[in-house]
């Protein structure tokens, strides 16, 4: 069974933070240094479990007049089961639920078509292979799960 929970702040989010470090540092080698920053204390950390075992995470935090998300990560054992897509959908739903004016993120350029399918707009390239995307929650396009992943 797949379950999810939102954890406010970093003090009680140890499982989510552990997944982030394992995915982005150990498994993918994308980040060589610290994957934690000043946003963690203010974040709503998403933790997704499969049969009560932590499997995926993401975070949502205030930025400007809206919300930002980052670090959608799925442990290697659970990849290919649409958990990253589930995290994205839960973030989108939470942003709508919270009445956010905008939702944005910096994502790897390779994932822009995936976010395009939800209605995100590419704002700018950041020069490091990343692209800044944003959406107004009322513009979200809901489609079949994993259709574009």
Image (tube, helix red, strand yellow):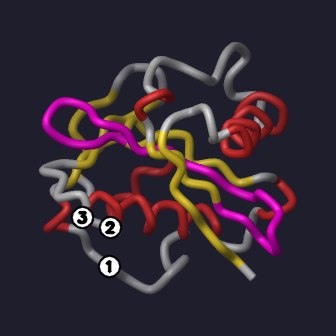
Q: Secondary structure at mark 3?
A: helix
Q: Are marks 1 and 2 in contact (CB under 8 Å)?
A: yes
Q: Mark 3, residues whose alpha carbon is within 10 Å: few (<14), some, or many (≥20)?
A: some
Q: Are marks 2 and 3 in contact (CB under 8 Å)?
A: no
Residue situated furthest front in the rendering = 12
Q: Position of residue 75 (x, y in %)?
A: 78, 52
Residue for point 29% across, 58% down: 95
Q: Secondary structure at mark 2?
A: loop
- The answer to whether residue 33 is left or right of residue 130 is right
Residue situated furthest top in the rendering = 33
Q: Nearer the viewer, residue 146 or 20?
A: 20
Q: Quadrant of residue 5?
A: bottom right
Tell me the residue that label 1 is attached to: 142
Relative to 14, residue 136 above or below: below
Residue 124, which numbered label? none
Q: Nearer the viewer, residue 138 or 95?
A: 95
Residue 96, which numbered label? 3
Q: Earlier in the sequence, mark 1 or mark 2?
A: 2
Q: Mark 2, residues whose alpha carbon is within 10 Å: few (<14), some, or many (≥20)?
A: some
Q: Position of residue 26 (x, y in %)?
A: 83, 31
Magenta-drawn segment: 48-68
Tell me how far mark 2 sits from mark 3, CA to CA: 13 Å
Mark toward the viewer: 3 or 1: 3
Q: Secondary structure at mark 1?
A: loop
- Check if residue 141 falls in the magenta segment: no
Residue for point 18% across, 52% down: 100
Q: Position of residue 74 (x, y in %)?
A: 70, 54
Tell me how far mark 1 sits from mark 2, CA to CA: 6 Å
Tell me the residue that label 2 is attached to: 118
């Amino acid at each position: 069974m797949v379950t999810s929970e939102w954890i406010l702040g970093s003090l009680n989010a140890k499982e989510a933070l552990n997944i982030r470090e394992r995915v982005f540092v150990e498994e993918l080698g994308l980040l060589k240094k610290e994957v934690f920053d000043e946003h963690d204390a203010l974040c709503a950390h998403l933790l997704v479990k499969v049969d009560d075992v932590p499997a995926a995470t993401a975070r949502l935090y205030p930025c400007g007049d809206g919300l930002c998300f980052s670090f959608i990560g799925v442990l290697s054992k659970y990849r290919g089961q649409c958990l990253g897509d589930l995290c994205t959908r839960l973030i989108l739903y939470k942003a709508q639920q919270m009445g956010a004016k905008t939702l944005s993120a910096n994502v790897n350029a390779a994932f822009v078509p995936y976010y395009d399918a939800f209605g995100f707009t590419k704002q700018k390239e950041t020069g490091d292979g990343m692209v800044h995307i944003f959406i107004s929650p009322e513009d979200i396009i809901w489609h079949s799960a994993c259709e574009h992943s």
